[in-house]
Image (tube, rainbow, N blue to C red):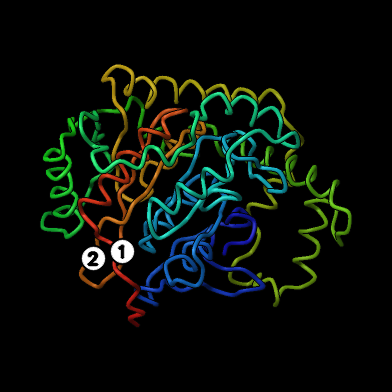
Amino acid sequence: MDEWANFRSFSGGGWSARGGKGGNPYVLSATPCGLSTGSAIAAAASMTAVTLGTETDGSILCPASLNSVVGIKPMVGLTSRAGVIPTTPRQASTGWHNKDRPICRTVAHAVHVLDAIVGYDPVDAPATMAASKYIPPGGYTQFLKKDGLRGKRIGVPNGFFNFPNGNVQQMVYTQHLNTMRKQGAIVIEKLDIENLSVLLDSQNNGQQIALPAEFKLSLNSYLSNVLHSPVRSLAEIIAFNNAHPVEENMKENGQTVFLVAENTTGIGALERAAIRQLNKLSANGLKKLMREHELDAIMTPNNAASSVLAIDGMPAITVPAGYGKQGVPFGLCFGGLRGYEPRLIEMAYAFEQVTMVRKPPTFLP
């Protein structure tokens, strides 16, 4: 599992000083993806029935997809973030793959866990209070419906399915779209998300300005409330890593992002402008597209749309979709607007039940 949600540096994911490098249980030499890696690996390999993780951008959706398990990323605030070190409170949520976000082998298992962890928490009052109005009476298990695709309007945006001709994933995703249509879904292809290239470019959309400053503030605040800790600030963590270069794998991983964050001085005019730009991009992008076309969800491969969904803390569910020629898993993601969890659960469960794609790990070399 990635230390610091893969926010210490730009190195490869799935590594921690305590646990080392995680392996994909289907193809051990393949990437398991980063961040909540351990949660996905443990669920996939049947080391545990359910796991939890946290997500800022892709931390649940990516490992779940590449380890052939189900990952639910609820909207920000639906589950409490108390005790979590969020990279940014704007985007961090818990679920199966975030703290208190479910990662399981089936949609039903993940939804049962979601029911157990949603709700108001006085320790995370503002976010959980705002989101609690979206929790349906009776919980989420009532949306585990085999006919959950019937009548759903599913958008397939351009820019995410860029596979070579004849690629296994492209062929499988096409088959899945046809399956959804046969199950009664209205699939609308070739939709354009406004300014998609900017939304996916953290250098130009404002994320690289806002995130480091938010991370430093969040981390220092968290450490100030820990009863017993040898470090009390980001600066002290940087110093600790420098003092233990072998244990912290500094030669390979470094701490580039930490250094950038430490050089920030809080949320000033530049950071506020970046956050406003992100909110505007989201409002004019996916949110506008979904409302104009009256969509219940967008469908994308793996975690391809995680950055688009993350900016406004929107929910998503990834479900096993297939396996490549070498046996490496890939997933299918349903994403929607805040409060769309019931619709996403219906679609994900119905898709899972009609396809039954998932198979046990193979542990190939």
- Towards the viewer: 235 or 149: 149
Q: Are marks 1 and 2 in contact (CB under 8 Å)?
A: yes
Quadrant including the C terminus = bottom left
Q: Position of residue 56 (x, y in %)?
A: 55, 44
Q: Amino acid at mark 1?
A: Pro
Can you say which quadrant of the picture contains the N terminus? bottom right
Amino acid, disc 2:
Gly
Using a 10 Å C-alpha cutoff, classify the residue at mark 2 as few (fewer than 14 neighbours), some (14 to 19) or many (20 or more): few
Q: Position of residue 287 (x, y in %)?
A: 39, 23
As helix, strand or loop, the secondary structure at mark 1 comes to: strand
Between the residue at mark 1 and the residue at mark 2, the CA separation in whole angstroms equals: 6 Å
Q: Answer above or below: position of 188 versus 324.
A: above
Of the numbered discs in the image, which one, if any, rests on residue 324?
2
Q: Kindly indicate the quadrant of the structure image that contains residue 191.
A: top left
Q: Position of residue 85 (x, y in %)?
A: 69, 48
Report crowding for label 1: few under 14, some 14 to 19, many 20 or more residues within 10 A (C-alpha): many
Judge whether 134 appears above or below 261 on screen: above
Q: At 62% across and 68% down in the image, what residue appears?
A: 16
Q: Residue at x 42, y 28 (%)?
A: 337
- Left or right of 212? Residue 196 is left
Q: Residue 27 at x, y = what percent?
A: 35, 75
**In the foreground, 166 or 173:** 173
Residue 229 sits in which quadrant?
bottom right
Q: Secondary structure at mark 2?
A: loop
Q: Residue at x 11, y 54 (%)?
A: 165
**1 or 2: tag closer to the N-terminus:** 2
Residue at horizontal 79 percent and vertical 45 percent from the top: 220
The residue wearing badge 1 is 329
Residue 249 or residue 63, whichever sits in front? 63
* Mark number, residue 348: none
Q: Is residue 161 left or right of residue 89?
A: left
